[in-house]
Image (tube, helix red, strand yellow):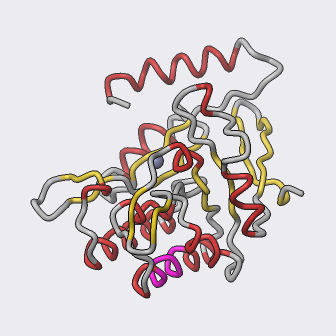
Amino acid sequence: MAYTQMDTYLQECRTLGASNNDMHILCGFECDYDARYIQWYAEHLVDTKKVDYLCFGVHYLVGPDGKETYIKNLPSQKQWLDLYTDTYVAGLKSGLFLFGVHPDLFGMFYKEWDKDAEYSARRILSCAAEFDMPLEINGYGFRKPQIDTQSGKRLQYPLENFWKLASEYPVKVILNSDAHRPQDLDLQNTGAFEFTSNLGIRPYGWNVGRNTDTTVLSLSQPLP
Ligand SMILES: [Zn+2]
């Protein structure tokens, strides 16, 4: 979303919320974690209650040419994997976000599953468990073209090898369709629900409640 669209989005979201009493409409942003933006997010979005929550991911990093680079375009090398992981872990520790989105997005540029990929996954999973930050399995990855790796074709994300490790940590897993269009909300038989049940993961749901003028989102029990 362009910065200039932000106020219109917030206004539309709040107007819809006020005119639909039978539905909770929450307002929030999936932010890019960047230490330089944290204070701005806190002051302009959270403290002002313009949003009900923020979540974060790492989509852009300063690349080899010194410019902000979409991570899919980074070299498939350990130094970029390490930078991604350091940044993601800092986001988990920042305390500003309700959950972390697609932690396994590094699979877009770091193509092979090797000991370095596993180490990154374990750093993220153990940090999320330690800071009690839910991690999201992102449904958009099921709608994207698959990529070629040395061990065959696979989704860009979610990474099966990443989520297989999740059961070794007391980490709370949530699901999101990441719908960019209404028709993306439900991908029958090929989405995040099926992915988690195949791996034996029990994802958590959400409770939505009101606390005076604030909408509060909290994790419910794992889904059956
Ligand atoms: Zn994202």
- Residue 70 in the image: x percent, y percent? 28, 51
- The segment highlighted magenta reads 118-124
What residue is shown at x 61% (from left), y 25% (from top)? 182
Quick check: 166 left or right of 94? right
How many labels sit on residues? Answer: 0
Residue furthest to the top: 19
177 or 12, which lies in front? Answer: 177
Which residue is at the far bottom?
Answer: 115
| Residue 121, magenta (yes or no) | yes
Instruction: Please identify the quarter of the rendering in which residue 128 is found.
Output: bottom right
Is 130 on the left-hand or right-hand side of 62? Answer: right
Q: In which quarter of the view is residue 164 placed?
A: bottom right
Quarter of the image where the C terminus is located = bottom right
Up-down: is 6 above or below 71? above
Above or below residue 121? Residue 143 is: above
State the quadrant of the N terminus: top left
As drawn, the residue found furthest toward the left would be 65
Relative horizontal placement of residue 27, taking residue 40 as reference (left or right): right
Residue found 52% across the figure and 50% down from its top? 141
Establish if 50 lies above or below 68.
above
Q: Residue at x 42, y 68 (%)?
A: 90
Residue furthest front as drawn = 152
Look at the image and say whether residue 47 sits in the magenta stretch: no
Q: Residue 112: where, in percent of width, then height? A: 39, 75
Horizontal arrangement in the rendering, residue 164 relative to residue 145 (left or right) = right
Q: Nearer the viewer, residue 44 or 206?
A: 206
Q: Main secondary structure of the magenta part?
A: helix
Q: Which residue is located at x 36 percent, y 45 percent?
A: 40
Percent across and percent down for residue 111 are: 37, 69
Image coordinates for residue 148, horizontal then vertical, percent: 39, 62
